[in-house]
Image (tube, rainbow, N blue to C red):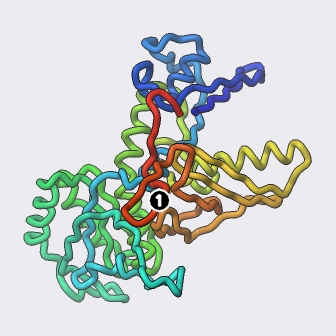
Amino acid sequence: FTDIVARKPGGEIIKTKVLSENPEVYQDAAIYGIRTMLNLSNNDSIPDNIIEAVKMGTTVATNALLERKGDRTVLVINKGLKDALRIAYQARPDIFAKHIILPELLYEKVIETNGRVNVDGVEVSPLELTELTTQLKEAYESGIRSIAVVLMHAYRYPDMEVRIGTLAKEVGFTQVSISSEVSPLMKIVGRGDTTTVDAYLSPILRRYVDRVANELGSKTKLQFMQSSGGLKDASLFMGKDAILSGPAGGIVGAAKTCELNGFTKIVGFDMGGTSTDVCHYKGEYERAFETEVAGVRMRAPMMKIHTVAAGGGSVLFFDGQRLKVGPESAGADPGP
């Protein structure tokens, strides 16, 4: 379900609950809930001077990552490092496992570029724009519209990444994520993973944000809950910030509710249709900077939440050897 809570000018709190999916009646549950609260029909426009601010948490990015339903993405990286993000740190979470199951990669194609600078920012190998342009056009013509650019030492010397990003936009890519902007930090694996996540999820997130913003009008301040538990303006909301947007709001709400009732130590359990989120709170929010969600490593501030791809709507199936749950979710039409 989608819950909407509103505060009137006089301080009165009102709330409503609507089905998250009901395509025959409405396209977006949150907007429908807002219309319901304002006593508007589904075809009425929302007056842009009646709502001061809308603050939302969304699981759009979370579900897309869990079910691997983000946008098709191409990775551009230095020559010789094609498999760097796949090899990563060679961590063995289950050291005695005989059969290692690696998580599915978010990018479907890799382009290696000759361009490279050393640790001092000196150009070791020049950027071959002609060859790179041809490869980018091939990726674009195959239907890919999202690109992640990750180069060695770009966190200090971003010029080469910026040039590639500009070239990608000229080719026609609609989502260009460069690591020096998304995660300007040392270590190419962590920086690369975070940039890939951003390129993979930002387009689907942007489409949702734009749809909500268009319904509300330009005078209504629209903010989204970040994975860190803070709010961010809709125009600046990025894929890497949205992984735990919905669950983070749940932690803040649970903590505040429990504190009002005299509890300062709680364990939160939040089961939705696609995932289940568990958190711990003992008087202050616990945050992590390096974390892993659905087999994907990220370096971005976020609430310390353990998420598994098993919810109320997760599909149970037999893969030929054993029964498995998720990550595919059955969904419902209509329904939560």
Q: Amino acid at mark 1?
A: Lys
Q: Is residue 291 above or below residue 308?
A: below
Q: Residue 176 lies in what quarter of the image? A: bottom left
| Residue assigned mark 1 | 324
* Residue at the spot 83% in from the left edge and 46% down from the top edge: 258
Q: Is residue 97 above or below residue 295?
A: below
* Residue at the spot 49% in from the left edge and 56% down from the top edge: 325
* Residue at the spot 44% in from the left edge and 81% down from the top edge: 187
* Residue at the spot 62% in from the left edge and 54% down from the top edge: 277
Q: Secondary structure at mark 1?
A: strand
Report the front residue among 169 and 15: 15
Q: Residue 38 lies in what quarter of the image? A: top right
Image x and y of residue 55, in percent: 59, 37
Q: Residue 184 lies in what quarter of the image? A: bottom left
Instruction: Answer whether residue 184 is visible to the viewer in this image.
Output: yes
Image x and y of residue 75, in percent: 27, 67
Instruction: Answer whether residue 231 is visible to the viewer in this image.
Output: no
Q: What quarter of the picture does the N terminus occupy?
A: top right
With 268 as the anchor, is 213 left or right in this view? left
Image x and y of residue 226, in percent: 57, 51
